[in-house]
Amino acid sequence: MSQLVHIRLAPEKAFDTESIEQALRQTGKWNKEHHAYVIRKRSMDARHRIVYNLQVEVGNKGEIDDAIRQRTYKSDHKERVAIIGAGSGGLFAALKLLELGITPIVFERGKDIRARRRDIANLTKEHIVNPESNYCYGEGGAGTFSDGKLYTRSSKRGSVKDILEVLVNHGAEPSILVDAHPHIGTNKLPNIITAMRESITKGGGEIRFNEKLTDLRITDGKIDAIEINGEEWHEFAKVILATGHSARDIYQLLLSKKIKLEPKGFAVGVRVEHKQELIDQIQYRQPERGDFLPPAAYSLVSQVDGCGVYSFCMCPGGVIAPCATDTEEIVTNGWSPSRRNNPHANSGIVVSVTEEDLKPYAEHGVLAGMFLQKDLEHKAWTLAGKTQAAPAQRLVDFIKKNKSTSLPDCSYIPGIASVNLWEVFPPRIANALKEGFKSFEKKMKGFLHKDAVIVGVETRSSSPVRIPRDRETLEHIEVQGLYPCGEGAGYAGGIVSAAIDGERCALACVESID
């Protein structure tokens, strides 16, 4: 019977086969002549001296299965399921339906990846926002051009391994199955997403681009048709709604149809950027990273007056990206290429929104959080000069509430404009950010560096709205056949958790089909 063996190796040995096998021999539980092994998990521990912890499955030859399961995607059933949105939730729902023999028809408001690249280039270089094709809308959803981090805590609700294997089946590096914090990289994700589309279409499914959900027809509490682009109706008895956290028009559509929504906790803040070299020095406690260590990351959290302030989507060797989905707004996010080899490190630093923060928007009811987001994004756009240049401030100046007289280099390509970000945020949120940054300095000495810059605003870390569903059937609690899914529905927070939720919704659809 196989067993898990734990070994610890220095960074220069952790990826070297000879060193790994020598360490296994020293445990007395592995012999090359009789045994085989598979690395199941690799993680770094930098708390004291820097080492890698490896979990290795060891067993007799022929006893260990290290094969990656191959899936078959083929429709063999007349039943069709509509999927609204071709992000992580929608694509994995489509693949799972095909695996189970059901035909998915995916309606995506944005464009395919190739055409989408041109719109993102226009946004970045010409400051032109296409409301239907941008960093958030289009093939692959928000994840396609925003990093590909695969770390999640959602394993209790589905198999993370299954999701990672599907990504490997479509071109991701097998190392994501082993790394404790797997990452694909924005430069590699588009090809993987394209391969997933090809699996869907070859299997008998469809992905229709530039097709936006504009209405729903509900009869006797059951979904029976959807309207696309304000003119064409399609009959469906099953609809998976996987529109992502930025599809605000969908929330307004649902409210207009008297479909129940709920407010959900969320957070807002900024992107903070340092030189990656500085973060390496702080985290590794040595002057240079060297050849065997990856660009350092961090995860920070603090409490300010009982409210959470924390880092989100930290991007080593990364870039701050413009993620507006409409004109007259600034929205930021971050991403890293697969090698994480850019000179800067950035992270969202966000503050949990309270009921008190939402009181000025109470007239909007369940959408109060959405209107807070919109207000901050519009203020950022206005104060920075009414282009896609983003409001920015040296971190040390923000602490002192001073507008910066100069700004350091920044990875945000549309450019940054000196703004006192205290003018963007409500006083409580700005003060929580200030105190949070001060506490981070105590945890990472040097965090408040004179050349660290904060860029606003980070408002789309999660949806402020939940579309409530039955815990067992996953259908909306009031509309039979409607399956709220993923980040936009309030049930996920990243590529993997949205993918898991997409698969769960697909399975729920199939279980309800006679």
Image: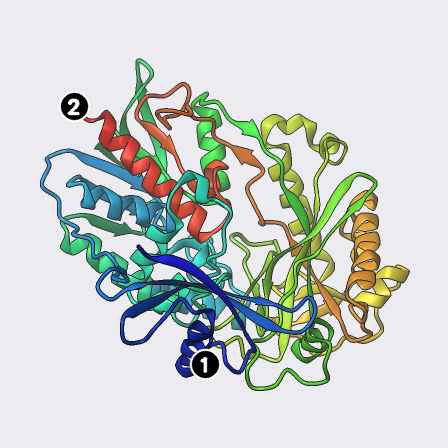
Q: Position of residue 251 (x, y in %)?
A: 49, 34
Where 101 falls versus 477 (above or below)? below
Q: Is residue 272 left or right of residue 149?
A: right
Disc on res. 19: 1
Distance between the alpha carbons at the discs numbered 2 and 1: 56 Å
Residue that appears at 65% across and 51% down:
377
Residue 439 vs residue 253, the one in the foreground: 439
* Residue 345 seen from this side: yes
| Residue 386 placement: quadrant | bottom right
Q: How is the image coloured?
A: rainbow
Quadrant holding the C terminus: top left
Q: Residue placed at 34% from the left, 63% from the top?
A: 113
In the structure shown, which secondary structural element does the residue marked by tag 1 occupy? Answer: helix
Tag 2 and tag 1, C-beta contact below 8 Å: no
Is 92 in front, or is 16? Answer: 16
* Residue 448 against residue 429 in the figure, above or below: below
Q: Amino acid at mark 1?
A: Ser
Occupied quadrant, residue 343: bottom right
Which residue type does callout 2 highlight?
Asp
Nearest to the observer: residue 295 or residue 109: 295
The x, y position of residue 352, in whole percent, is: 70, 42
Q: Is residue 66 left or right of residue 266?
A: left
Q: Position of residue 499 (x, y in %)?
A: 38, 48
Residue 426 in picture, x, y percent from top left: 79, 44
Which residue has dot 2 on it? 514
- Quadrant in the rendering for residue 427: top right
N-term mark: 2 or 1? 1
Disc 2 packing (10 Å; few <14; some 14–19; many ≥20): few
